[in-house]
């Protein structure tokens, strides 16, 4: 193996380990507490032979705030939760992303597909959701998690949105097997729930709110130290100060997940450059590589960094890159 390949391999290993780390935060603790409450109450009701209307959680945040990561971590840390697995009927949690286009029929078909019951396209939406309801009961599914759930609502006409509301309600209120819903998505998702008071009162909202220097300045210092420790690299002298933290938060468009991505990307730049510490130059290079922007727009350089629209810069580059494996796949980062 060439020296260059060896380095790529070693760097890849370190970065992959960093990407697998999970930073705990307050909304995640709230999510965890709320999920445990719903799960254990539902199990107790089942054990006692009681049935009640199911409840749900709605996790709201901008693109890059960390919704999908939080949901995956929540389910992974629950060792006692029976997940969907091949050759196993019981699946207490089923989790999937709302497909595109997010018509009611397509969403129902994707749910059936995810649990191993592909169905022909010529069935009506009503039949598909009734079948899904039966399968959820058979599989003893307590929670259905739909990620990217704002798409159930965006670009739909009034009649379609009403059907979505009715379908979600009937899943939760089904007398023979009520299924709890966990919806995660962008802030527009709130509008869907607010259309129907009966529906919205069944959901506990949890917000992955944007971060700021005042609320997260100290926490970020710890997060950076933690990631650098894991990569066995020190911070270059003189890099860390409140001005730097503000620029970092701005570069990540005020979203915790995006800020963490930039920290990891800066560490990667340092490793690739054989630097013995991580400094401002690495953060500058990381943002430049991700956004492709000129230095005047780089929040780590620009004097007037607050005027830079970092979300737009990061989103533009993602939308330009064609996905070779999934050319029709929706691009993940979107302008808020
Ligand atoms: N708590 C966390 N700890 C470590 N990394 C995180 C955390 N939350 C988010 N991230 C990282 O931030 C990035 C964005 O997170 P994620 O994809 O979950 O955001 P999202 O809110 O689902 O965005 P979108 O709406 O675009 O799907 C990912 O690279 C993820 O690994
Ligand atoms: Mg997501």
Image (spheres, rainbow, N blue to C red):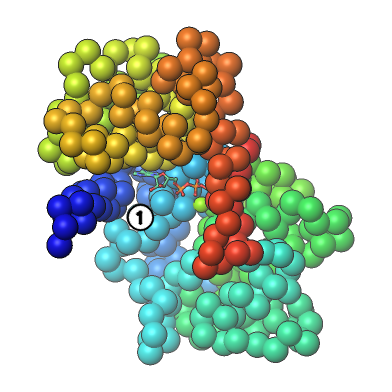
**Residue sitting at x 65%, y 52%:** 150
The correct choice, above or below, for 247 with respect to 52 in the image is above
Judge left or right: residue 335 versus residue 230.
right
Disc 1 under 8 Å from ligand 1? The reply is yes
Q: Tell me, yes or no, if residue 23 can be seen here.
A: yes
Where's the C terminus, which quadrant? Answer: top right
The correct choice, above or below, for 321 with respect to 219 in the image is below
Q: Nearer the viewer, residue 261 or 290?
A: 290
Hey, which quadrant is residue 227 in on the image? Answer: top left
**Residue sitting at x 60%, y 48%:** 320
- Residue 172, x across and y down, in percent: 61, 66
Direction top: furthest residue: 303
Q: Nearer the viewer, residue 202 or 47?
A: 202
- Residue 164, x across and y down, in percent: 74, 63
What residue sits right under mark 1 in the picture? 73
Where's the N terminus, which quadrant? Answer: bottom left
Judge left or right: residue 182 versus residue 2.
right
Local crowd size for mark 1, using a 10 Å CA cut-off: few (<14), some (14–19), many (≥20): some
- Residue 19, x across and y down, in percent: 31, 49
**Residue sitting at x 37%, y 55%:** 74
């Amino acid at each position: 193996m060439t020296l260059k390949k060896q380095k790529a391999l070693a760097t890849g290993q370190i970065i992959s380990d960093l990407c697998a780390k999970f930073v705990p935060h307050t909304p995640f603790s709230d999510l965890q507490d709320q999920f445990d409450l719903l799960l254990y109450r539902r199990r107790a009701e089942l054990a006692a032979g009681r049935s009640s209307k199911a409840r749900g959680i709605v996790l709201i945040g901008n693109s890059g705030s960390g919704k999908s990561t939080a949901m995956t971590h929540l389910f992974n840390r629950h060792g006692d939760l029976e997940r969907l697995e091949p050759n196993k009927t019981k699946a207490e949690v089923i989790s999937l992303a709302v497909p595109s286009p997010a018509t009611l029929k397509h969403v129902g078909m994707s749910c059936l597909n995810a649990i191993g019951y592909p169905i022909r396209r010529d069935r009506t939406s009503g039949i598909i959701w009734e079948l899904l309801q039966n399968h959820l009961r058979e599989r003893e599914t307590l929670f259905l998690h739909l990620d990217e759930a704002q798409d159930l609502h965006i670009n739909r006409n009034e009649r379609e949105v009403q059907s979505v509301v009715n379908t979600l309600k009937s899943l939760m209120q089904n007398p023979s097997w009520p299924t709890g819903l966990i919806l995660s998505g962008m802030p527009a998702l709130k509008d869907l729930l607010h259309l129907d008071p009966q529906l919205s009162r069944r959901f506990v909202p949890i917000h992955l709110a944007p971060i700021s220097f005042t609320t997260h300045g100290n926490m970020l210092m710890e997060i950076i130290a933690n990631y650098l420790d894991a990569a066995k690299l020190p911070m270059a002298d003189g890099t860390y100060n409140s001005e730097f933290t503000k620029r970092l938060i701005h570069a990540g468009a005020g979203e915790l997940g995006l800020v963490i991505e930039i920290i990891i990307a800066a560490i990667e730049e340092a490793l690739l450059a054989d630097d013995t510490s991580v400094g401002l130059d690495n953060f500058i290079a990381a943002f430049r590589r991700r956004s492709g922007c000129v230095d005047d727009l780089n929040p780590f350089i620009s004097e007037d960094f607050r005027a830079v629209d970092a979300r737009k810069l990061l989103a533009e580059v993602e939308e330009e890159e064609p996905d070779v494996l999934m050319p029709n796949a929706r691009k993940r980062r979107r302008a808020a």
